[in-house]
Amino acid sequence: YDKCIREGEVYFYAYFRTVAGEHFFKNRETKKYFHLIIDSFSRAITIKPTPRAKTSFAVALSSFMFLKGKNNIAKEEIHHVVALLEEVISHNPGYITAFFNLGLLYFRNEDYGNALDSFSKVNKLLTDGSGKLDPWCLHNRDYGLFNLFLRLPLNQHLLLLLKKAPHAESNFNNLYQFAALFFISLIHEEQRDLFSSLDALRKANKLYPSNGIVVKKLVFLLDVLGYRDECLEMYEKATEMMPMDVDLRIRKIKYWYLCGRDYQIVSELSDLKKMVAIVKPLNNKLNELKTLIESMGRFNDGVCFYDNLKESMLNGMVENLYSSIKKYPHDSRLLFRIVTIWQELGRLDKIFELLKDYVFHNKYIF
C-alpha cells in the first residue's frame, strides 16, 4: 500500500513539474506516466481503501480531467470524481481534505451552490476542531488559481511539518481554512452577495494577513461598500506589501482623491512617476499617470469644472451595487450605500427614484 501511494505521488508531482517546463521525463513523453499515476492509486485502493488513497485518486483524476479543457469534459467524468469524494465523506464525515477537494471540483465546474456547501463544511470542521485535515494527500497542481495563492505557502508549511516545527499542524490547518474562506468569498461575490463576500475575506485575512491577492480583493470591497477608514488602512498595508504594483498604487491615489486627501496625493504621484520612469518595464504606465492627473477636476484651474475622476469612480460603484441589490432587494445596507453615493454625486432625482421603487414597486432601475 505505502509503495503504491509513494509511486503515485512521485509520478503525479513530477508530471506537473514537467508540464510546467521542468524536464523530469526524457523527451517529455508524459502520457504513459498519467496511466502509471492512475494505476498506482488504483492498486493502493485495492490493497487498503483508505480516505487518503481514494481522495488522492480523485485529485489525480480531477487534475487530468481539467487538463483536457473544460469543454472536453464529459458529465460522467465529473460525476465519477464527485462519487469518489462523496463515498469518502459518507464513511469519514470528518475528513476535511475530501470536502475541500469536492468544493474545488464544484467551484471549477461553476456549481457554486454545492461548492459553497463544501467549503462551508471545511470552515466549520476546522473552526470547531471536529475534523481531520490530511496534509499528505495529493494537492492540486493543475489549477492556476490554486497555485497562484496557495502553492508557495503550502510547500512552506509542509516543510515545517516534516521538521516537526512548533505549531506546524495548527498553522497548516489555518492555511486551508484561509483557502476555504477565500473560495467562499469568491462564490458570494459571483452571486453578488457582497457583504457576505467581505465577511469571508476579512476572516481569511486574519488567518493569513500576508496574502496579497486577498488584501487587494479586500480593498476593492471595502471601497465599494463604503468602509472608508478600514479601506484607507488596508490600502496602506497593501501598498507596503506590493510597492511595485503600479495599478494598486494608482487605485490608492484615486481613493485618496475621493476621500479628499490631496496633501498625500502630490507626494505619492511624485514617487510613483519616478519609479515608473526608472523601471523600464513600467514605462508604459507614464501615459496612464498623465491621464489620471488630468482627470482630477478638483486640481484644475477655474471655478466651474467637471470632476471626471470622482464621477467615474462613484458611478462605477453604483453600477456594481445595483447588480447586487437586484438579487438581494431586501438588503437595506445596499440601499443605504447607493443613496449615500447618489447624494455625494448630487443626484437627488436618483435617490427619489430608488426610494420610490424600493417602497412601492420593489424594483430597481439604473
Image (cartoon, rainbow, N blue to C red):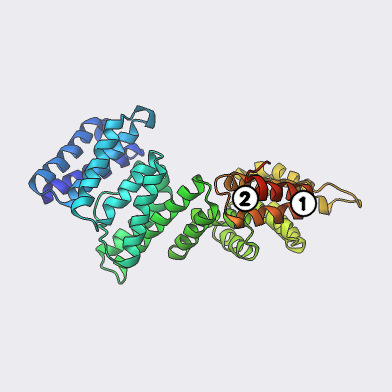
- The answer to whether residue 320 is left or right of residue 154 is right
- The answer to whether residue 4 is left or right of residue 214 is left
Please tell me whether residue 160 is drawn above or below residue 220 in the rendered image. below
Q: Residue furthest top?
A: 72
Q: Are marks 2 and 1 in contact (CB under 8 Å)?
A: no
Q: Residue furthest front?
A: 360
Q: Which mark is residue 345?
A: 1
Closer to the N terminus: mark 2 or mark 1?
2
- The answer to whether residue 239 is left or right of residue 187 is right
Q: Quadrant of residue 45?
A: top left
Q: Secondary structure at mark 2?
A: helix
Q: Which mark is residue 246?
A: 2
Quadrant, the C terminus: top right
Taking the spot 72% from the left edge, 42% from the top edge, the residue there is: 287
Please tell me whether residue 186 is drawn above or below residue 153 in the rendered image. above
Q: How many marks?
A: 2
Taking the spot 25% from the left edge, 68% from the top edge, the residue there is: 164
Q: Which mark is residue 278?
A: none
Who is closer to the viewer here, 108 or 139? 108
- Is residue 10 visible in the rendered image? The answer is no
Amino acid at dot 1: Leu
Q: Residue furthest right?
A: 303
Please tell me whether residue 242 is drawn above or below residue 23 in the rendered image. below
Q: Position of residue 201 (x, y in %)?
A: 49, 58
Amino acid at dot 2: Val
Who is closer to the viewer here, 163 or 59? 59
Taking the spot 55% from the left edge, 49% from the top edge, the residue there is: 328
Q: Position of residue 40 (x, y in %)?
A: 15, 41
